[in-house]
Amino acid sequence: MLEPKTFEDANKIQKIPGVTEGFLVFGHYDYVAFLDVMGLEKVGQIADKIQKLGFVRYVETLIER
């Protein structure tokens, strides 16, 4: 069972402008966020914001073209 704090943290990520969807997942990753932004610079800015939330230890960025 997931802790309520997990859902609170997920909601913090989903509130970041540019994040269009997000899903709690199990396995190597705990959360997957989908972004809809123009340019790689914006992707990096959002990744930095996610990293700075305090509860995120690692961010990996995958790009679909």
Image (cartoon, rainbow, N blue to C red):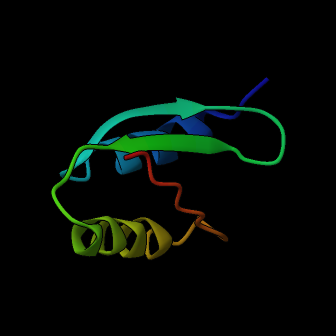
Task: Give the quadrant of residue 36.
Answer: top left
Up-down relation of residue 9 to residue 55 (above or below)? above
Which image quarter holds the N terminus? Answer: top right
Which percent across, then down, holds residue 4? Answer: 60, 33
**In the image, 21: left or right of 41?**
right
Could you tell me residue 11's position as x and y percent?
Answer: 39, 40
Q: Relative to 24, is 1 on the left or the right?
A: right
Q: Residue furthest top?
A: 1
> What residue is drawn where x is 21% and y is 65%?
39
Nearest to the observer: residue 16 or residue 11: 16
Q: How many marks?
A: 0
Across and down, in percent, residue 14 comes to 34, 42
Horizontal side of residue 18 vs 55, given as left or right: left
Q: Can you tell which quarter of the image residue 19 is in? A: top left
Residue in the foreground of this view, choosing between 7 and 63: 63
Residue 21 in the figure: left or right of residue 8? left
Residue placed furthest toward the right: 27
Q: Residue 5, located in which quarter of the rendered image?
A: top right
The vertical placement of 48 against 10, above or below, is below
- The residue located at (52%, 61%) in the rendering is 61
